[in-house]
Image (tube, rainbow, N blue to C red):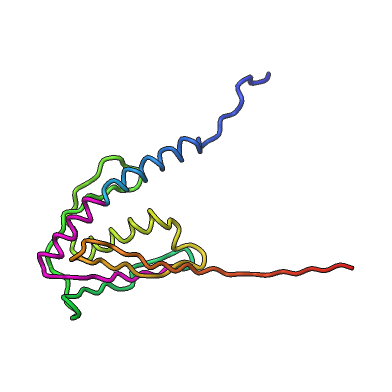
Amino acid sequence: MTDATPPQPAIDMAKTMERYAAWEAAAARLVPDNKQRLFAHLASANITRVVVIFDGEGDSGQIEDIQAYVGDEQASLSDGKVDYLDLPYGEMQPKLCRYSTALALETLAYDLLREKHAGWENSDGAYGEFTFDVTARTITLDYNERFTSSEHHSYSW
């Protein structure tokens, strides 16, 4: 006896990628509001600039340091909370979270890294820093990607 119906793949990759693209787009739409709320919070604490340093390698990556400034003087981040719309992976409804200043900065940095350089932590990884200019309400990313290179030459005469 033969089965006329061909076997179906266990995972429909087209649908999986479609769902991922929809989630990624929904997450990106949250960035402007989160940025605005974070800048308002930093400004209320008189912070003028924040530098967020990250480093990745070997399929892992992390925020290494967060440095806040008032003018040219290093300062402490405020103890206050920031309302942040988070969209956990695979979900389509954002959740309003009350994050510490440091966690809001980290989360936004990770969101922006995923948006511009997904996989930044893989293989030899990438490193760099975000500069949050609170006065100008801009975020600048200085990004450095590491890679291993190999050159091969073969000759036959």
Q: Is residue 39 magenta?
A: yes
Q: Is residue 58 left or right of residue 155?
A: left
Q: Residue at x 61, y 69 (%)?
A: 149
Q: Residue furthest right?
A: 157
Q: Is residue 106 magenta?
A: no
User: Could you say which quadrant of the image residue 104 lies in?
Assistant: bottom left
Q: Position of residue 110 (x, y in %)?
A: 33, 59
Q: Is residue 107 left or right of residue 135?
A: right
Q: Residue furthest bottom?
A: 73
User: Could you say which quadrant of the image residue 47 lies in?
Assistant: bottom left
Q: Position of residue 107 (x, y in %)?
A: 28, 59
Q: Residue at x 38, y 55 (%)?
A: 114
Q: Residue at x 55, y 34 (%)?
A: 9
Q: Position of residue 28 (x, y in %)?
A: 32, 48
Q: Which residues are magenta?
A: 32-56
Q: Is residue 16 left or right of residue 113?
A: right
Q: Quadrant of the C terminus?
A: bottom right
100 or 52: nearer the viewer: 52
Q: Quadrant of the N terminus?
A: top right
25 or 70: nearer the viewer: 70
32 or 150: nearer the viewer: 32
